[in-house]
Structures are given as structure tokens and as C-alpha cells.
Image (tube, grey):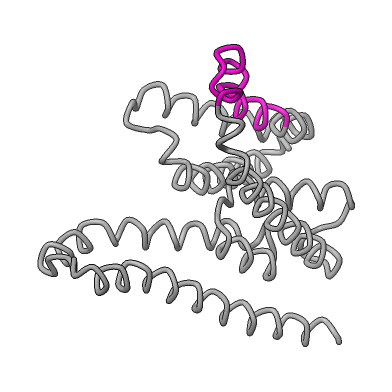
Amino acid sequence: MNEQSYIRSVHRAGRIWNLSVMVILLLVPVVIGLVFGTLPDWHGFLMGLIATAPMYWAVAVIETVTYVPMLGAGGSYLSFVTGNISNLKLPVALNALEQAEVSINSEEGEIISTVAIAVSSIVTTLIIILGVVLITPLTPVLDSPALAPAFAQLLPALFGALGVVFISKNWKIAVAPVLLMLALFIFVPALNASTVGIMVPVGVLFTLGVSRILYKRGIL
């Protein structure tokens, strides 16, 4: 199979699986509503959809433009189906590409990104299953006050480690987005963990713009 045939098969399978997952996700509340006779007030539902849908459409467009060039075709389809892109799939793909010393624009990069995200999704699913099975016997241990400080630092430790790796490669590019995010989260209290899906693409686009300016001025 040549590259063009592979890409066509990826797009075909990706469209089928993404549309299938979308239908299944939409069917869950519909089936529950039909079984228990608790269908929503359609007028209220429509008003709420009109109020919130445009924001998610904008985020969908931004995330597609931002993530696809970094994840490749296969990796993008897998990531959008399995979710948790900014926290898990994107770092996994970038780290795999870095370790293999290949670009996502190459044939090798496309395959490596897809395999890395697929393995990440499988491992995540297995860990979730394991967590569900062991949650009851491990609850006393997990709720221990001695472990509370460690759990509070999981995400900072994860992103701190990733940050050191990528920032150290070219600190000039990293200065602008770091300052932007610090200013936004300090001076705009409404921003929190739930806005990560929006702020990551915003940060990427801002970084690209600043990097282009620095490059034009000969700083990079």
C-alpha cells in the first residue's frame, strides 16, 4: 500500500468511526429519555442549544486547525474519538515524534503519531477498567491525608516535565505564550481547568503569530 492509498483508507475509516461514535453518543440520552419517559422540553432544549452551540462550533474549528497539523490524519481521528487531546493525546504524539526524530509531515511521522495515540488510548482504557475494579478496596488508601498533597500536584508535575523538555529547545518561542497564559489566568478569574480546551488552541495560534514576527525580525 502506497502513501496515498494509506491516507485514503485512514480518512475512510476515520469518517466512519467518528460518525458512528457521534450517533452512539447522541442515542444514549435519547434512549434513556424514551425508556424512562423523561424527554426534555424541546423549546428549552432549542434555546439552550442556540445559546451554547456557536461556542462549541468555534472551538471545533480552532481545534481542528490547531491539532491536525500536529497529530496527522490517523492520530487526529483517533484523538477526536477518544478525547482528552490536550492533556494526553497531544503530549504522547509529540513525545513519540521527538523520540523517533521524525516530522509529522513525513510518512514515518504519520504512522508513529497514530500508533502512539492508539497505544495511549488502549492503556488509558485498561487503567480506567482497573480503576473501576479496584476503586472500592483502594478508596481508604486514596483518601489518605498523607497522599492528598501528591494528588494535588499530579497535573503540575506532568505539564512541568513536558514544559521543561519543550521550552528548553527554544526558550525564545516559549516566552510569549507563557506570559500570555500567566496574565490571562491571573487577571481573568473566570478562566479555570474547564477552559483548557479553548485556551490551548488560542495559545498555539498566538505562539505561531509571535514566532512569525520574531522570525521576520531575525530573532529566531
- The magenta stretch is 140-161
Left or right of 13? Residue 105 is right
Q: Is residue 41 above or below residue 95?
A: below
Measured from the top left, where is residue 204 in percent x and y? 56, 46
Q: Residue at x 50, y 72 (%)?
A: 21
Dividing the picture into quadrants, the one containing residue 55 is bottom left
- Considering every residue shown, the one lying at the far right of the view is 100
Please state the horizontal and vertical placement of residue 153, each as a whole percent of the image.
60, 22
Q: Is residue 177 above or below residue 198?
A: above
- Quarter holding residue 50: bottom left
Image position, residue 69 (x, y; %): 65, 61
Residue at x 52%, y 42% (from the top left corner): 203
**In the rendered view, does 111 fall on the left or right side of 118?**
right
Which quarter of the rendered picture does the N terminus lie within?
bottom right
Is 32 in the magenta? no
Q: Predominant secondary structure in magenta? A: helix
Residue at the image point whose x is 60% and y is 33% from the top: 137
In the displayed structure image, the side of residue 17 where residue 43 appears, left or right = left
* Residue shown at 58% from the left, 15% from the top: 149
